[in-house]
Amino acid sequence: MTDLIKNSSKSFGSLLDELFTNAPGWNRPEIKFPPVNISEGKENYEVDLYAPGLDKNDFKVNLDKGLLTISYDKKVETTDKKAHRVEYYQSSFKRSFTLDDGNIDAAKIDASYKDGVLKVTLPKKEQTEIEPKQIEVK
């Protein structure tokens, strides 16, 4: 019976290892890119990319022919320290989204990074109402 208890019990350290190993997060090897929320307001669209702990200077946001691309590339710096455990790292990713170019004012697109969220604001172009009219057939 003591063998059963010994084999079924885990040490506190191994429980913590399991907890942190199985913790959710996009910055794990099996998840290749951070999650996004895309919303639409009256005057713009917003893309919120969840990427905590990254350097805003390593983000690139491009719009080309209706394709919005958000990428991140962090060069890994080598160190002479020996790591005993590495649970976080910065990596590269690239996300692309197809946009309706006719509805976005590309000159006014804005991006900011605050509290671990990259926010890309895509202002809508002003829509002019086409007045209905009767067209005479000649």
Image: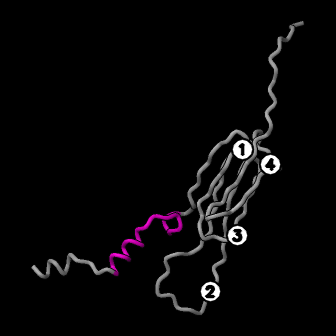
Q: In the rendering, which numbered label is found on residue 44?
A: 1
Residue 41 in which image quadrant:
top right
Amino acid of disc 3: Asp
First in residue order: circle 2 vs circle 3: 3
Q: Residues within 10 Å of mark 3 (few under 14, many from 20)?
A: few
Looking at the image, residue 56 lies above or below residue 70 = below
Hey, which residue is sitting farthest right in the picture? 138
- Read off the residue under disc 4: 106
Q: Is residue 101 left or right of residue 39?
A: right
- Read off the residue under disc 3: 58
Cα–Cα gap, marks 1 and 3: 25 Å
Amino acid of disc 4: Ala
Q: Quadrant of the C terminus?
A: top right
Query: Residue at (75%, 39%) from the top-left corner?
Result: 103
Q: Secondary structure at mark 3?
A: helix
Residue 30 part of the magenta-drawn span: yes
First in residue order: circle 1 vs circle 2: 1
Cα–Cα gap, marks 2 and 3: 18 Å
Question: In terms of depth relative to the viewer, which is nearer, 91 or 36?
Answer: 36
- Where are the magenta residues, as a range? 13-31
Q: Secondary structure at mark 4?
A: helix
- Read off the residue under disc 2: 78
Q: Is residue 7 left or right of residue 95?
A: left
Query: Residue at (59%, 51%) from the top-left corner?
Result: 37
First in residue order: circle 1 vs circle 4: 1
Cα–Cα gap, marks 1 and 4: 11 Å
Looking at the image, residue 110 lies above or below residue 126 = below
Q: Secondary structure at mark 1?
A: strand
